[in-house]
Amino acid sequence: MTSSLHQRSRWRRTVQTTVSGMVTASWLMLQMLTALPPAIAQSEAEDELFSYGEFLKSVDAGQVEQVNLDPERGIAEVIFKGDDEDTEPRQVQLFAGDGRNPDLIQRLRQEGVAVEVASAGNGGAIAWVATNTLLIFVLVFGLLLILRRSAGSAGGAMSFGKSRARFQMEAKTGVTFAEVAGIEEAKEELQEVVTFLKKPEKFTAIGAKIPRGVLLIGPPGTGKTLLAKAIAGEAAVPFFSISGSEFVEMFVGVGASRVRDLFKKAKENAPCIVFIDEIDAVGRQRGTGIGGGNDEREQTLNQLLTEMDGFEGNSGIIIIAATNRVDVLDQALLRPGRFDRQIMVDPPDAKGRLEILQVHARNKKLDEAVSLDVIARRTPGFTGADLANLLNEAAILTARRRKEAITMAEVDAAVDRVIAGMEGIPLVDSKSKRLIAYHEVGHAIVGTLVKDHNPVQKVTLIPRGQAQGLTWFTPDDDQTLISRSQILAMIMGLLGGRAAEDVIFGQAEVTTGASSDLQRVTSLARQMVTRFGMSDLGPLSLEGAQEEVFLGRNWLNRSEYSEEIGSSIDAQVHAIVDRCYGQAKQIMLENRLVIDRLVDLLVEKETLDGDEFRQIVSEYTAIPQKTLVKTGS
């Protein structure tokens, strides 16, 4: 309160100083302007005047045609005979009283000079007064504008700590739970919250209490914010929505003030829902600065913890928050009493993806041959946002090709673009193109002939993104658990491209095209040894998951094993990769004929789908029964 009074006092002194300065400057300018016209007139007169005696001599000599007398200024304008119309009259300074001297006027008329008596200074005086009046008006207007801005700045400073939450008395987002698909478990949990707000007596009759908070956890694009909009659409209660970053400011205490203001408004409108998106922006662990910390974000978090479960009860206020970084949230924020429920919003399975596609396909014109079920099975790992983007890309491509409806060709192209990037210019037939063809066929032939590998979806030489060629493998179903044989099959499939280059062109001609494949191979083999216990070292977990370094935690990575175990890990990783690479090369040597045929066909057509690829391979060798899966429509 004292700080606020001091601030107001300083503002008043500033305004008073500004006003007095402006008034003083205006007065000085007015005085200068008042003195300016006579000086200017005198300067101009000195340039044009000639002597009174010369004037009388010219009159007596009959050289003057007309004289205009100005008694106010004491000046006579003389027009000589023979002057052109554009010639300026000569001015004569008269003696005092001569401007109205009847003797001078009579003398001029006796000489036949036309005389006119008029005051030429009246118009100039009026113009001078008007100009100065306008200038004073401009100065006053500028002063008022400065005062208004100063008052606005002071008002903004006073309201700096107000909450910026968007408030809707009856939120009409246009989204209901019917629009949310693929996350049925999360919908059921939140539907219960909505029912609690609408019919609390159904729960309070048996002693149940309304939950304080619900935390939505999941990767980006899984539908956390969409769920919040659905809650707002379903619950006929006031709805506050704000982002976590809107609490944080560079000024100390502003964030805590906004939290207090938000909960004050929420209490006034209880029962209500408060939705905080990206809560990790304000809810990160405290004390993570070097040597501790008392920064603005920590004060904001402390205030949020107090408001959610402090000395005062927040009856009727439900906090719903969303984050994809639950690992960095403060533990005090996650305990029951603050966030009683933590709901995982994971990427959908095949059934969920089908439901999401059906929702997003309502406003799309799809060809009758388009199978949403096939698209759902082709897109494992896709989130709801990915699937929405997929259908939108297909629609854009359809319009570009001037078709009436979306076909599977556009959907396939959209899947490729979402996964691998924009399509590039096809390669011309050359040694480089054939080398890339052998590389991609090497991946595909190993993936087809190894029993536990995912089936081939497509092989193409059309560049996408940074890749000059691509081979897609589509799993039969969503894989939550992966066996040791499946991981070894993946390693062999990744090494198939390098093995093909080695067998066909020789060790000296291998290229850098397998660089990303080798990175994935090394990572998989090391995880088999250090995390999954799938090596001769036994069922040991020697390393944790590779997480991002968080300031104040995991500052130094402590080794969890001895140097001897480290050497054994390296040896086991090397042995796994060598064994898989040898098997991949053996497959190349045993199937050289079919590889050459597939390469010639791929160079000609540039793209082979999985069914066609397997059909050609089956003519030369037996394909393991497990991978004989139709991936087309």
Image: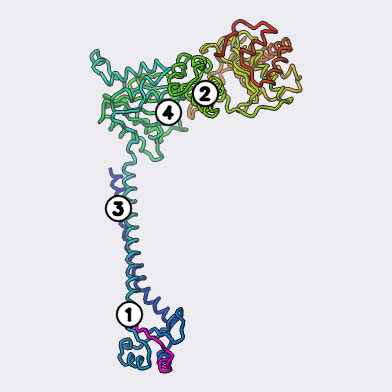
- Residue position marked by numbered label 4 in the rendering: 280
Under mark 4, the amino acid is Asp
Q: Is residue 39 above or below residue 204?
A: below
Of labels 4 and 1, earlier in sequence is 1
- Residue position marked by numbered label 2 in the rendering: 547
User: Is-magenta flag for residue 414?
Assistant: no
Q: Which mark is residue 12?
A: 3
**Callouts 2 and 4 close, C-beta under 8 Å:** no
Q: Nearer the viewer, mark 3 or mark 1?
A: 1
Q: Which mark is residue 119?
A: 1
Of labels 3 and 1, earlier in sequence is 3
Tell me the quarter of the image containing the C terminus: top right
Under mark 2, the amino acid is Glu
Query: How far apart are the alpha carbons under marks 3 and 1?
Result: 51 Å
Q: Is residue 92 above or below residue 578?
A: below
Query: How far apart are the alpha carbons under marks 4 and 1?
Result: 83 Å
Mark 2: few/some/many CA within 10 Å (<14, 14-19, 20+): few
**Callouts 3 and 4 close, C-beta under 8 Å:** no
Q: Is residue 28 left or right of residue 430?
A: left
Query: Residue 471 occupies which quadrant of the picture?
Result: top right
What residue sits 46% from the left and 86% below the top?
A: 82
What residue sits 32% from the left and 22% below the top?
A: 234
Q: Is residue 218 visible?
A: no
Q: Is residue 502 left or right of residue 165?
A: right
Query: How far apart are the alpha carbons under marks 1 and 2?
Result: 94 Å
**Callouts 4 and 1 close, C-beta under 8 Å:** no
Query: Residue 42 occupies which quadrant of the picture?
Result: bottom left
